[in-house]
Each structure stands twice: as C-alpha cells, then as structure tokens.
Amino acid sequence: MRYIIYTVFFIQFSQYCHTRVLTGSKGLLMINPLSNDGSVQTESTSYNDTVLFYLYTKNSPSTATQLWVNATDAIKSSNFDFSKKTVIVTHGYMDDVNSDITQSIKNDLLKFDDVNVIGLDWSHFTKSLLYTWVVSEVPNVGQFVGEMANYLVSLGLSTSNVHLVGHSLGAHVSGFAGKRMQESGFVPARVSGLDPALPGFNGDNPSSRLASTDAQFVDCIHTCGGKLGYAVPICQADFYPNGGVDIQPGCEWFDFGVCSHGRSFEYFASSINATNKFYAESCNAVVGGVPYGCSSSSAEMGYFATPEYLGEFYLQTTGSFPFSMNITNISI
C-alpha cells in the first residue's frame, strides 16, 4: 500500500514544478518554495518538534540517542565522537528514520566503518498525502538540518568530516543543508544524492534543488531518471547504473518506478562494504539510459566515490543483492 501511495502522488504532482503552497497547519509556517524567478524563498521557524535527529554509533548501533540543536548537554552525554566522520542520512517521501533507506545505510556504515551516523526523521511531513506540501517543506527542513550541522561544527566537528546523504526528497534536503552551512561560512565535505526527486523541483535553478555547489564534493546516483528522479546531471559526479532509468535489474514495470527509485540507496548501502566494487566508465553523456563516448576509468559509484573522478559515469549491476558485478577479496 505504501508503494502505491508513493507512486500515485509522485506522478500526480510531477507536472507542478512551480506549485505554491501558502497555507499552514498545526501552527507551522508554510513557505512558497519557488518564486516567480524559480528561486527558493525560505522563512525561519522552529522545527525542534518535527525534525528529529537520532544518533547511532558503533557502540550503540541499534539504540538511538536523540539530539537537538543547541542542546549541548545531550550531545556531550551521548556517544558522539567529534574526531570521527559524521554521516547525516535523510529519508524521502512516505518514509521515516526506521525505513530501509536509513537503517540499511546506518547498519552497513557501523559494520564496515567507524563513524557517527545521524538518522534524520522528518516523517511529520513526509507521511502526508499532500505531496506539494511536503515539497514546500524541503527548503526549511534542509535549513534546519544545516543548523544542526553548523552547531556540531561550532562544538568541534571538522567540516571535512561532514557527509550528508539523502534519498529522493531527502537528497534535496541534504542539498539545502549544505547551502545553509555555506551561509554560515562552513562548507561540508560531501553531499550524496540518491536518485534526487524530480516531481516538484525546478531543474533549471540550482538554488531550488540539490546542486553541484552544495559541498566540496557532490555525487549522485540516478536510478529512475525522468520519472521519480532526475535524469539530467545535477552533481559533480553523476552515476547512471544500468543507464539510470526505470526499469533497474530485478525490478518490475508495474510499480511505476518505485523499485528502481529505491535501488539508488540499495546500491549505496552495498558499496559501503569495500568488497562490493561498483566501478564505472567515464562518459561524455548518458541520455535516456544510453551512454555515449564512454571509456574505462577507476571511478567508483557509492560510498567510495571521490572528487578525483568528476562528470558522468555508466555501469551495470546485477538484479539482486549485493548488486555489484565486481566482488573482490578485500578483507574487512
């Protein structure tokens, strides 16, 4: 049922890229996400009760500790380690912090790496059937996530250890978080967009969506391009597994792209295990799922992507976990 709702509302509102939502509910101030010139207009409001942060660490991989912006005691009494990389994972439409997107990435990060993982829960908004309202909240939620990142930096976290990861709408939330950090003079090390949502966003204006300038390094994985996700390159490194379009291997046609849309975070989660290599060819372009002018490279899609390799990339995957066609014998 969740997949049916997800698909229907994504497609239903895909034509309204400039829709304005000006009403409010539950005492929250709504915004007009896209002005006449396509830029985002945001307003300051408190999201402490509706945008929630949950910390997971190697010492407590299954038990989350809630954190709050400007709540120093809560952070200092937690297992948060300011010397380690911090990965903030943001879910998308109809999901929450307990959904597969957050939990699969969190579990593999804490199994194969030693980092702080902060799972964002903005399901107060994403569980709504009014997709346009959810889209209208993306800039403000992203700004609030940026406030949390700024606060952690002010307490001693290095910006070189800030990695924002988001799926679908969460990819744009991560982008706006990066924008907010830069407004404060901080530049996050990386933003990873996992099939950034297409419906409801202005592709021509970088200020209205995830953009290549939102971090030192911005990488994207496209898996349902032109339907539920962006098909055009909007990041510094844009990876197009199996052409980046619906239908991804192992998925079916009848879910209108939901399975393919989710493959982006499944590929990313699998890539955290260094034995699962997702090597990609460098291409002049990937259009409509077809790669053009490709040549071999050492670029890797997913967690181990690096700014050494920028541009558009093509690769193939298998249709089932771990999805990689290059399984190595690296010991973890």
Image (spheres, grey):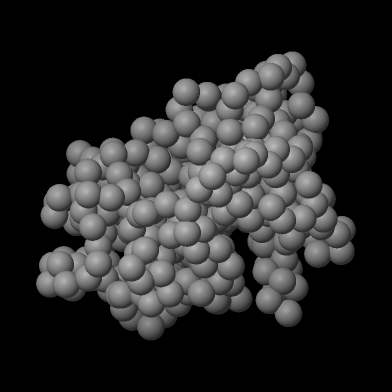
Give the quarter of the image for residue 173: bottom left
Question: Residue drawn at (47%, 53%), measured in percent from left and top?
Answer: 112
Please state which of residues 144 and 120 is positioned toward the viewer in this rendering.
120
Residue 193 against residue 100 in the figure, above or below = above
Quadrant containing the N terminus in the rendered view: bottom right
Give the quarter of the image for residue 60: bottom left
Question: Residue drawn at (37%, 63%), measured in percent from left and top?
Answer: 58
Q: Residue furthest right?
A: 253
Please state which of residues 57 and 225 is positioned toward the viewer in this rendering.
57
Please state which of residues 97 and 122 is positioned toward the viewer in this rendering.
97
Q: Residue furthest bottom?
A: 26
Question: Residue drawn at (85%, 59%), measured in percent from left and top?
Answer: 252
Residue 30 seen in the figure = no
Judged left or right of residue 260, residue 269 is left
Question: Residue drawn at (75%, 73%), measured in percent from left and top?
Answer: 4
Residue 98 seen in the figure = yes
> Where is residue 269 drawn, in percent x and y?
57, 54
Residue 81 against residue 193 in the figure, above or below = below
> Where is residue 202 drawn, in percent x and y?
55, 44
Residue 52 against residue 326 in the figure, above or below = below
In this figure, what is the number of numbered marks? 0
> Where is residue 253 drawn, in percent x and y?
87, 58
> Where is residue 308 drawn, in percent x and y?
47, 23
Please state which of residues 114 and 56 is positioned toward the viewer in this rendering.
114
Residue 48 against residue 329 in the figure, above or below = below
Judged left or right of residue 306, residue 284 is right
